[in-house]
Amino acid sequence: MTDSSSAADQNKEPTLTDDVGELLTLVRSHSRRLSRVKKLLAQVDKKEPRAGDYETWLEVHQGLEGYEIAIDEVDQRRQSVVERMGKQLNRLRVKARMTFLTKLDMLAGTKELTVEKISESPLVLYLEPLTFEVDFDGGGVRLLYGHELIDDTLSINASALIDAHAKYLAQLKKLAIPSEDFFDLLFDAYQTVLARTHGEQESRVDLVDVLVPLAMLRADDKSLRKKGIHALEPFTRYQLAWQLAQLRRDGLLEKEGRRLDLGAATGGSTRDKSDVLYIPVGAKSGQYYGSIRFNSTN
C-alpha cells in the first residue's frame, strides 16, 4: 500500500500553485544575479580604467565572468563587456604594476626601507625582514616571514603594505621572547612532545609538533584553570621561525649542557609544507627544517 501511494505521488501532475512557486523561484534567482551585476557595474560606470583603480576593475571583471544570467540577450551583452574589460585589464595591469612599484619604492624610502625584488613572475618583494607575494591576477597580496604566512588579506596598495610591514614587524618584536628564555621554553616543549609520544631522551620529534606545547607553556596558570584550552593563544608558525632565527642571530644554540639540533628537510620531505618550517637567512636564503632534538653536551 505504501509503495503504490509513493508511486502515485511521484506521477502526480504539479498543481498550478507548484508551477507558480517554481517560476517565482526562478525569477528571484535571476533577479539576484542581475542585482549583483548591477552593483558590480556601478563601480566602474562612466569611468575610464586607471592604474589606481586596477583592483576594482579586476573585481568587476571576475564577478561578471561568474554571473551567467540565463537570459540570452543579457548574457551576450555581459560576455561582450567581459571580453572588452579583459583587453583593458591586460593593458591596465602593466600600468598598475609600474605605478604600484614606483609608489612602494618611494614610501619605503621615507621609512629608510629598501624594496628588493626576489622574483618577477610571480612578483615577490622583500622589505627586511618580511616578504610580499603580489598577485595582480588575483588582486591580492600575501605577507610572509620567510615562507611562513602572516596575512593573506592585503590589497595591492603601496601605502597599505608599508603600514602592514610596520604593524607586523612591531607585533613580531613585541611577541618575541628573549633567546635565553626561549631556549628553555623550547626545551620544555620538546620534552612535552617526548612525553606524549613516549619517545626516548634525545630522540628526534617533528619540529611543528612543538607549536601546541609552546602555546600551552606560555599560557597564564589562572586563565588555564578557568578557561581550559580556550585560554591558549596560538603560537604561530611564523613566530616559531622568528624565534629560531633569533636564537641563531644571538648564537644561542647551546646552553647549560644542552645543544639544540634542528634536522634539515630536503627532497620529498618538503612536499607537504605543513610538516616542515622554513627559517630564512636574509632575503633569498633559508632552509626548511622538519625535526628537532636536544642533545646533552656533558
Image: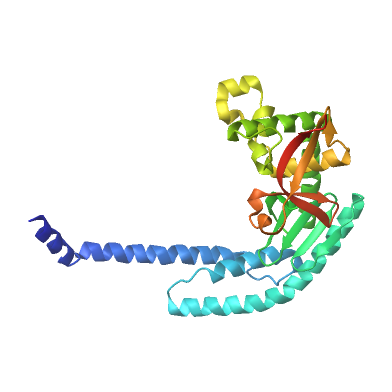
Query: Could you tell me which quadrant the N terminus lies in?
Result: bottom left
Residue beneath the point at 77% across and 72% down: 94
Q: Is residue 254 left or right of residue 197?
A: right
**Residue 36, placed above or below residue 203:** below
Residue 275 screen position, x and y as percent: 64, 49
Q: How is the image coloured?
A: rainbow
Question: In the current view of this chain or complex, which residue is farthest to the left?
Answer: 1
Residue beneath the point at 39% across and 62% down: 28
Q: Is residue 229 left or right of residue 88?
A: left
The one nearer the camera, 37 or 284, is 284
Q: Is residue 31 left or right of residue 138?
A: left
Badge count: 0
Residue 145 visible to an observer of this rendering: no
Residue 50 screen position, x and y as percent: 74, 69
Question: In the current view of this chain or complex, which residue is farthest to the front?
Answer: 298
Residue beneath the point at 60% across and 24% down: 224
In the figure, residue 125 lies in which quadrant? bottom right
In the figure, residue 21 lies in which quadrant? bottom left
**Residue 290, placed above or below residue 201:** below
**Residue 263, placed above or below residue 195:** below
Residue 208 visible to an observer of this rendering: yes
Residue beneath the point at 60% across and 79% down: 83
The one nearer the camera, 32 or 227, is 227
Residue 92 screen position, x and y as percent: 73, 73
Query: Could you tell me which quadrant the C terminus lies in?
Result: top right
In the figure, residue 13 lies in which quadrant? bottom left
Residue 214 screen position, x and y as percent: 68, 33
The one nearer the camera, 62 or 41, is 62
